[in-house]
Image (tube, rainbow, N blue to C red):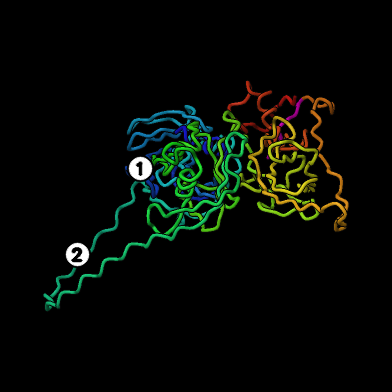
Amino acid sequence: MKKYLALILAIMLVFSLCAVSANAADVVTVTPNSTVGGETLVLTATGLQDDFATYQIFGLTEYCLWLAGDGTFSFNIDVSLDNAGAHFADLKAGEVCNIADGYNGCYLYLDDGTVLVLLDKDNPGMYAAVIADTPLSEFPGTIAMPGAAAPAEEEPAAEEPAAEEPAAEEPAAEEPAAAAEDAVVYVTISVAGEIVAPSVPVLVSDLDADGAFNVDEVLTCAHDQLYPGGAEAGYASSYGDWGLGMDMLWGDTSYAFGYYVDNAMAWGLSDPVQAGGSVYAYVYTDKEYYSDTYAYFDQTDAVAEDGALTLTLYAGSFDENWNVVFAPCAGAIVTIDGAATEFVTDENGQVTVTFDKAGSYLLSAVGADEYTILVPAICKVTAEVPTPGEEPAPAEEPAPAVIPDITPAHAKGTTTYTVKEGDTLRSISKEFYGTIFRWRLIYEANFDSMKGIDMIYVGQVLQIP
């Protein structure tokens, strides 16, 4: 479970749904198209409401079961339930549980990576935005209603014995996929904010000979070629209940890992990687809240002609449906070869960096304060600086950097805030501090009154430090 803590914490849960009819008093069995621990899952429930639904987590459709407040449920096999990103309960096969006993919002991971969620329709809490609108015929599972007779099987008609036909030839066995030829992939690795491999070209082999590359193969080859002692010393992965997971990255075994492919969030180590593509793997700096924000420049390799280069920095966040989206990152401080500079990204995420000497440099960026933790973006720059006596090409005067207002809320005369519909800690942080990245400050100030990250409710009064 620990290796997936980042993913579980990150599940701040977004929703779009399906539907089904059932009598709340009936006993209903549900068999999703999935298994748990390799065993077929069957859920038996009473009080099933008139909606059987799905919701979205980062674009993946998951199962969602609505029960009445006095509904019960049980599973045919032993299962482990989570709630709000933390372990909630271990249930034995056949153990009957009441939704009213605190199981509302619990979820169970299935073998295929989806999630089965148990909800009290009358008290949906943070799932209030769920709307059922998909017919049962489109639901990918089996729902058995009580009293439904199985269709009678017709007796096959007696057949005249047919003349024997010559035996058909056995179809030729399919040839296994040919292994992909070795190819270059550009790999970046950072550990707690320190860049240890900046967009290094790595020769990747198709280790499982399936004709394609995946993240695991890229990182294995990267460690073999870059880490002292090779992959055996610095990288490890293994299969668990939720697929292929990372156990060690650059010698770190904290399980606080993230990775992107071509600047898009990867779902797992089995995700495909194209020849000539890029993989960025990192160890989190913030191992408590996992608040590190992935960031990237619009250029990875660039030439600073006449000693100047303009870049745009983008940082990830979540939209209203909790999908990862990228937007220009304002107020970030550019570093050159690890040293902070006076160059700061403006409100459009842009910055013009100048160089006094010709040479090769590594640019990155850091947040303006301790609450803005950026996964270090990288740009490898070759600076071309005119020699004395040469006339440099005329360049436009860069606009002054606009740093967002992050004046503490109390300095603005506000100390409390009443939560409205649609609010999140990030949106409240944006309203008071001008940036979404100070949400943790609000969370820590209200820790005693919150059950989990972003588990806020309409009408709740928050202290804004």
How far, Cα to Cα, is label 2 from label 1? 32 Å
- Mark 2 is surrounded, within 10 Å at the Cα level, by few (under 14), some (14 to 19) or many (20 or more) other residues, namely few
At 75% from the left and 38% from the top, the residue drawn is 333
Residue at disc 1, secondary structure? loop
Residue 56 magenta: no
Q: Position of residue 108 (x, y in %)?
A: 44, 38
User: Is residue 288 or residue 128 the one in the foreground?
Assistant: 288
Q: Mark 2 points at which residue?
A: 155
- Mark 1 is surrounded, within 10 Å at the Cα level, by few (under 14), some (14 to 19) or many (20 or more) other residues, namely some
Q: Mark 1 points at which residue?
A: 41
- Residue 406 picture quarter: top right
Three-letter code for the amino acid on which mark 1 is drawn: Leu
Quarter that holds the C terminus: top right
* Disc with the residue nearer the chain's start (2 vs 1): 1
What's the mark number on residue 163? none
Q: How many marks do you count on the picture?
A: 2
Q: In this view, does 165 lie above or below 449?
A: below
Tell me: 146 left or right of 461: left
Extent of the magenta region: 416-422
Residue at disc 2, secondary structure? loop
At 80% from the left and 38% from the top, the residue drawn is 342
User: Is residue 330 or residue 298 the one in the foreground?
Assistant: 298
At 33% from the left and 43% from the top, the residue drawn is 38
Residue 20 visible, this angle:
no
Q: Where is residue 230 in the image (x, y as percent from the top left)?
A: 45, 41
Q: Position of residue 43 (x, y in %)?
A: 38, 40
Q: In this view, does 185 lie above or below 373?
A: below
